[in-house]
Image (cartoon, rainbow, N blue to C red):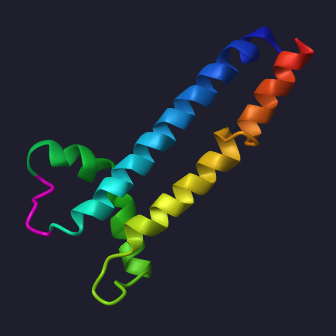
Amino acid sequence: MTPLLLQVLPILNVALGLLLAFWTLTFLLRIVLTWYPQIDLEKGLWRVVAVPTEPLLSLTRKVVAPIGGVDVTPVIWVGLISLVRELLVGQQGVLSLVLMRAQTLA
């Protein structure tokens, strides 16, 4: 492996893990906010939750209808992002294994 890749890989692993964790947290907040429909997500700090999640949720709502009047699309995205996070940067994730392999070879 090249020395540049050995320097970039740990940063990529941490950055991707943090990004996916942030995204999971925003979707979890969206789940909680569905209990409070009077909150306007377009105002104040709620935009921090709405902006990164709404594009994906609006696309998913076209495919998955509400179940019993409850929007389940944030739950679907929490599951998908958690899966991707485990597959990429989890303990047995692809990036984690490549990083460990590269460190043992170096």
Determine the image quadrant of residue 96: top right
The reply to whether residue 1 is visible in this rendering is no
Expressed as whole percent of the image width and height from the top left, the position of residue 77 reads 47, 62
In the image, residue 38 lies in the stretch drawn in magenta: yes
Expressed as whole percent of the image width and height from the top left, the position of residue 85 reads 60, 46
The reply to whether residue 51 is visible in this rendering is yes
Residue 76, compared with residue 64, is above or below; it is above
Expressed as whole percent of the image width and height from the top left, the position of residue 68 reads 32, 90
Q: Between 56 and 46, which is closer to the camera in this rendering? A: 46
- Left/right placement of residue 3 relative to residue 66 reads right
- Left/right placement of residue 25 relative to residue 45 reads right
Residue depicted at x 43% and y 81%: 64
Q: Quadrant of the C terminus?
A: top right
Residue depicted at x 66% and y 18%: 8
Q: Between 60 and 97, which is closer to the camera in this rendering? A: 97
Residue 78, compared with residue 13, is above or below; it is below
Residue 81, compared with residue 31, is above or below; it is above
Determine the image quadrant of residue 2: top right
- Left/right placement of residue 72 relative to residue 8 reads left
In this picture, which residue range is highlighted in magenta?
A: 37-42
Residue 67, compared with residue 71, is above or below; it is below
Q: Quadrant of the N terminus?
A: top right
Determine the image quadrant of residue 36: bottom left
- Left/right placement of residue 28 relative to residue 48 reads right
Residue depicted at x 61% and y 56%: 83
